[in-house]
Image (spheres, rainbow, N blue to C red):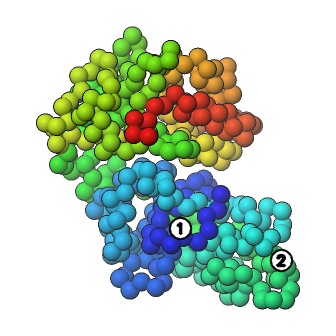
Amino acid sequence: MTTTFVNEPIVPVELKLPTGTVMTLYQPGWQAVDDGSAAFLGKEGKVFAFPDLSTLSRFVKSDAEHDLTASPYLSGVQDWDIDKYAEELCAYDLSAPPELADGHLEEEEQASLGSTLALLLDLLDYQDIQDEHADALRDDHEVEHLAAGEQAGGLFSTEKRRQHVVDLMGAHWVWCVNAVTKGIEQVDTSSLPGSAAASGSGDSTPIEDIVDAVTVWFAFSEQGAYTLRTTTLHEGRPNYLGRYSSGSMSLLAATDVDTLRSELGSGKAGTLPGVRLPDVDTRPDLSLTPADDFIFDLVEIADSISPALSVEQADRLVTAWSELSRLTAWGKWADVAALLGTESPVGRFMVTVAIDRAQDRPGSEQALGSADTKSVQDAWNRLVEAVYAKVHLIDV
């Protein structure tokens, strides 16, 4: 998917690069502002990149200095929850723009390609990349029109002019993308200044510091779902917030943490067997915000299942699969178990490829290259749909 022009001052973006997929923040109208902020979340020409939205959100909420710090719009982004990030996310495939897959640019594809061109040109400018390849794109009038949201050409020879853009990108695109990829820097958030992990301080108390339970967030294609599970084992597995109805267990969840907190207070959220849930009315400091390790964007994970699966992405994939396996065992969902067990396409991929890839073992890249990742991705999507069918959202 390529996102067309956006109106939001600052948006999260997913960049598909030759080296993998990363997340960052982008300010499309940076040239029109006079507050000292720049086009991207970064510093000194280096774009800060993150493996997922939860890590990006954690960095943005910290007091780390960067080139968007001066923007008056940043405080609004800092208040977003993970659902808002997912809602505003704009995706760009820089490694292989889908509009050019057939070697032609159709009239209806101009807007989305123009959005991608605008982003690439801003990356080239932010990183101050000067080269004949970059200048060939910067100085071309048709590229300029598309990047500005206009049509290529005027009333005459529009098809010829669109083909000119295709040929120009064929000659210079790969070099430019490889150049900007070198200026994209992965950020380690484990010791961020101002983060709870670094300072050991904060005004809120995570639920796991009060009882033997954690908040878990799953992102499905329809929407996100917050729930609770125990950190202790009961009959060999953790328990989840749920209820028994119509002959099977349903996972109880809410679309945001505030609703989950409210439903816990009212008693409508059910019980968590083995754990006495805290009284939220007497614990205003109680935080139900999930830790990074318990945030599972199942849609984003599906997109990562490809021949370019990185070590970090494989680790998230295996972790999500393990969590879904625990959840399925708790719910005793035979139909879901058939989709994630070791005899299923997803389970076989975990055992034969993903676990080794997550640990960066020798030979894992060769195994990944020989796997049918498209079939695995399709199977993963079927698995996620089956799990979503077992979720009961208390606030919907």
Q: Amino acid at mark 2?
A: Gln
Left or right of 159? Residue 191 is left
| Structural crowding at the residue carrying mark 1, measured as other residues with C-alpha within 10 Å and reported as few (<14), some (14–19) or many (≥20) | many
Question: Of residues 382 and 67, which is closer to you in this image?
Answer: 382
Quadrant of the image containing the N terminus: bottom right
Picture quadrant where residue 279 is located: top left
Q: Is residue 393 above or below residue 89?
A: above
Of circles 2 and 1, the one toward us is: 2
Left or right of 117? Residue 242 is left
Q: In x, y percent, where is residue 348? A: 66, 25
Label 1: which residue?
183
Q: Residue furthest left?
A: 282
Q: Is residue 138 above or below residue 67?
A: below
Secondary structure type for disc 1: loop
Label 2: which residue?
163
| Structural crowding at the residue carrying mark 2, measured as other residues with C-alpha within 10 Å and reported as few (<14), some (14–19) or many (≥20) | some
Q: In x, y percent, where is residue 194? A: 25, 56
Left or right of 278? Residue 374 is right
Mark 2 or 1 closer to N-term? Answer: 2
Q: Is residue 236 above or below residue 368?
A: above
Q: In x, y percent, where is residue 275? A: 27, 21
The residue drawn where x is 27% and y is 29% is 267
Picture quadrant where residue 317 is located: top right
Q: In x, y percent, where is residue 190? A: 34, 48
